Image (cartoon, rainbow, N blue to C red):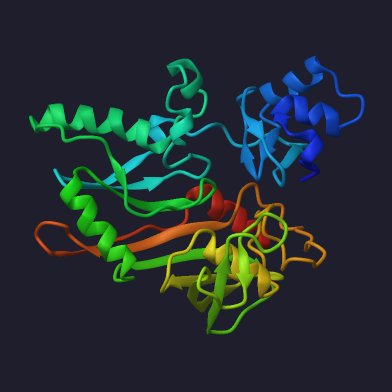
Amino acid sequence: MGTESYQVGEDTQDAVLGALRKLRDGLTWSGARKLMAARRIGINGVLCVDEGRRVVIGDLIEVREQPFPPVPRDPDVQILYLDQDMVVVNKPAGMLSMRHPGDRSWRQRRKMKQPSLEEVLGRLIQHRDRQRRLHAPGELQAVHRIDRDTSGILAFARNERAAEQLIEQFASHRPLRRYFCVIPGSMSAQTLRSWQVRDRGDGLRGSGPRSRQAREMVTHINPVRELRGYSEIECRLETGRTNQIRIQLAEAGHPICGDVRYRGPFGAEPAADSSRAHRMALHAAELGLEHPTTGEQLTWRLRWPPDMLRWMDTLR
């Protein structure tokens, strides 16, 4: 898949189309809008359909030869579990989990261009609660996160007490979290340990020396199957730092297929990606935790989405 990539610098920070015109010689406003309408513009590997989206230093703007998949909508979200305390869902890739606080004041028309998971769930839960004649609790509260371009299992609390209990579980690393991903080459069963710093030197998180500010990252790796030149592996999180799996695999020389941001350690030439992955090949496949009220141990498992299974077939 042909892709042009442009990294935003200090002098090219702007709304996305304005930045792209500065970075791509000869691009007109009408040409830029046509690219956006055709779903060919992405930011950090995720489709962008909002002209007002601002980009900052370090962001990677892509112009793809083939369009991105359509924006996920309400029917693409599957509720796996729902009660008065919590909701567990199957999040589609390309959907933001929680909208940034500064963006919550957007008009509804702008929000609907790329709805967030919390907004979609608000509508779906309201409908289900009416059917069950349940009293609707307050706003959803995030207790853990998965990246926008990652698919799979995600849990939210529905009240303060449940949120406190679930956040405490994740802070003490008790929940079971398994991910599937596809990488170039192969890896043996092993444990990756490093210390995450907020800025490795280029504005991105990464591994650095152990310090009071650094946070430990521990990921357990197990091979699943060999593909032609690639491998499917399982990653079990012992800790759950931001972008942990992406960072550690890239630094180990096996950046996740379709990940445009983490392609290697700081200072090294970014590894090429010839996998033709249409999105990042990372999937939250299993989550196990204690119910915040009853203490019952609950577990959910999900296989890869159909589009990713079809893509993996091309690798075989």
Q: Is residue 183 left or right of residue 71?
A: right
Work out whether 185 lies above or below 91.
Answer: below
Residue 89: x percent and y percent?
32, 47
Residue 258: x percent and y percent?
66, 54
State the image quarter where residue 133 is shown. top left
Q: Which residue is painted at 47% across and 16% down in the image? A: 109
Work out whether 145 lies above or below 195.
Answer: above
Query: Where the C terminus falls, by quadrant?
Result: bottom right
What residue occupies the far front of the structure in this picture?
A: 212
What residue occupies the far right of the structure in this picture?
A: 26
State the image quarter where residue 52 is shown. top right
Residue 62: x percent and y percent?
74, 40
Q: Is residue 85 left or right of residue 234?
A: left
Residue 251: x percent and y percent?
67, 71
Q: Which residue is painted at 72% across and 68% down in the image? A: 265
Q: Is residue 141 left or right of residue 215?
A: left
